[in-house]
Image (cartoon, rainbow, N blue to C red):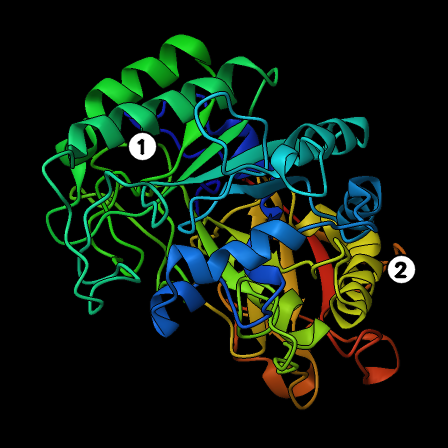
Amino acid sequence: MTAPNTNVTNQLTGSRTDWHTHDRFGLFIHWGLYAIPARGEWLRKQEKISDAQYQVYFDEFNPTRYDPRTWASLAKRAGQKYAVLTARHHEGFCLFDSKLTDFKATNTPAGRDLVREYLDAFREEGLKVGLYNSLLDWHHPDYPIDRLHPLRDSGVTRDDTYDFSRYVDYLHGLVRELLTNYGKIDILWLDFSYDDMTGEAWRAQELVNMIRSLQPDIIINNRLTTGHTNLKTGLQMGDFSTPEQIIPSSGMVDAQGNPLPWEACITINESWGYSSGDHNCKNPTDIIHMLVECVSKNGNLLLNVGPDPKGEIPDEHVDILEQVGRWMRKNSESIYGCGSSDLPKPEWGRYTQNGNILYAHILDKPMGPISLNGLGGRVRKARLLSNGTELAISKPWNAADCVDNAFFYLPGNRMPDPIDTVVMLELIGDSA
């Protein structure tokens, strides 16, 4: 057995992604004007809302309880190491003080550069910071009225002044502002390509060259050339893949079978943006299991919340993140810096690994002792990760013929943590 691929690199990424593949757990934040109607971030498209109808939300946008320091503190307590905020979603509204548009937060009753405040707060907590910028823009007059546009069935057509190249110039200009005016940005999350709106339609190579010239260490997701549902394309351009609302069955690899950096973006309920009627939240156990599954396949989990119109993360989301954080405080060593193991998935749970330390995540306690298939004579010591309790490696009398396996019993023959009992196994013969 060899050491895991915890620092996944390839010719596209070099060492830029090392911190990302180490930190493993991040917070996605979808927030914009769509928080006010509270029916999700795609409501303009779904309900075919015109600019004039949408203007009411711009005119009243005033998140008086917005304090990103509370967001950052929550993320840190949850064990998340980085965050990504929607600086501008498909609606075209900028949470930052762009010089290229009037459709921005500083022109609303909020009167504040909300992106700057977010960046300052998360950096103060020692967290990496990312910004999301949509490739689409349903507000801009030079964006085409296509099958996704809110005006697609309105009868509105563009006049002779329509020029898509002007829109692409605008898109590049917004990216330049975000990467010039706000200090070091760790992640740029671009969303998303579709139909013929992909790759060079966005002048993608020119855009990436500009991004790299402004911030050489930034990492970029893969959606300049990839849609939000694709699990096969890999990294045509960018540093990491972004499966959405799904965890790949065996991680993500390139055409040669080499592991690629990837990050599953998943909502805490069923919605990205704030939706007042959506209380179908994943419980803390589900989220911890998703995180462990991602890491066991060399991936990350980017867990989304949608703040409300006043700027607060919903209480039920806060409670869930707090509970995840309690597990992480005792078990984060099995997440940070870890990746997959070459051992097959055990029946009782999953493995994560960092060098010669193998972490057994026991999710379902079997009858009798825990069997470590293929590790007979390979385990130097075993400890409960949460408190350091020693677990003796021994051969049960009724498993004498299982010579290739190692065994241990949990204290009292029960799971100390019913969510995920993690056992740290120091292996003989492996190295980082």
Task: Say whether disc 1 or disc 2 marks the residue closer to the N-terminus.
Answer: 1
Q: In front here: 333 or 16?
A: 16
Q: Residue at x 44, y 21 (%)?
A: 15
User: Where residue 431 appears, x then y in whole percent?
Assistant: 55, 34
Q: Is residue 13 above or below residue 216?
A: below
- Closer to the eye: label 1 or 2: 1
**Is the residue 378 above or below the residue 86 in the image?**
below
**Amino acid residing under circle 2:** Thr
In this rendered view, identify the residue nearer to me: 142 or 371. 142
Q: Callout 1, which amino acid?
A: Gly
In the image: residue 266, left or right of residue 320? left
Q: Which SS class for mark 1?
A: loop
Q: Nearer the viewer, residue 97 or 246?
A: 97
- Residue 366: image x %, image y %? 64, 86
Q: Position of residue 94 (x, y in %)?
A: 52, 38
Which of the numbered marks, if any, corresponds to residue 389?
A: 2
Q: Which residue is mark 1?
A: 238
Q: Which residue: 79% across, 79% down? A: 415
